[in-house]
Amino acid sequence: MIAYATYCRIRSLRQEQKLKVGQIAQHLQVDKKTVRYWLQHDYHQPQRPGRGSKLDAHKPLLKSWLEIHL
């Protein structure tokens, strides 16, 4: 995954300066495949799966213990 700033730079170099894929790759020091990919796709943040805690099943018990002892 590249930074959003790099993605924007790839797009602007292509649209404003009309540079070729190889020229953009050389200018930003990234692979040509990376440049091609991001010219064809929109930028998206990686999605992390939402995970529960191992203690989720025991939260009511833990809360009751904390209320008693605090």
Image (cartoon, helix red, strand yellow):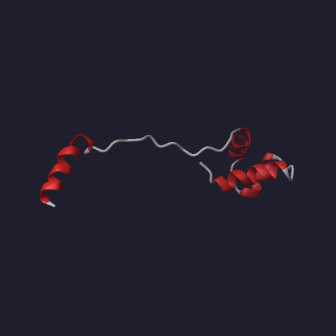
- Please provide percent x and percent y for residue 28: 72, 57
Report the residue at 34% width, 42% height from top: 52
Residue furthest out toward the bottom: 70
| The C terminus - image quarter | bottom left
Image height of 28 relative to 54, above or below: below
56 with respect to 30 (left or right): left
- Residue 54: image quadrant is top left
- Please provide percent x and percent y for residue 23: 80, 52
Report the residue at 54% width, 44% height from top: 46
Residue furthest out toward the left: 69
- Please provide percent x and percent y for residue 62: 19, 49
Q: Is residue 22 visible?
A: yes
40 with respect to 50 (left or right): right
Front residue (pair 65, 57) = 65
Front residue (pair 63, 9) = 63
Report the residue at 74% width, 54% height from top: 9
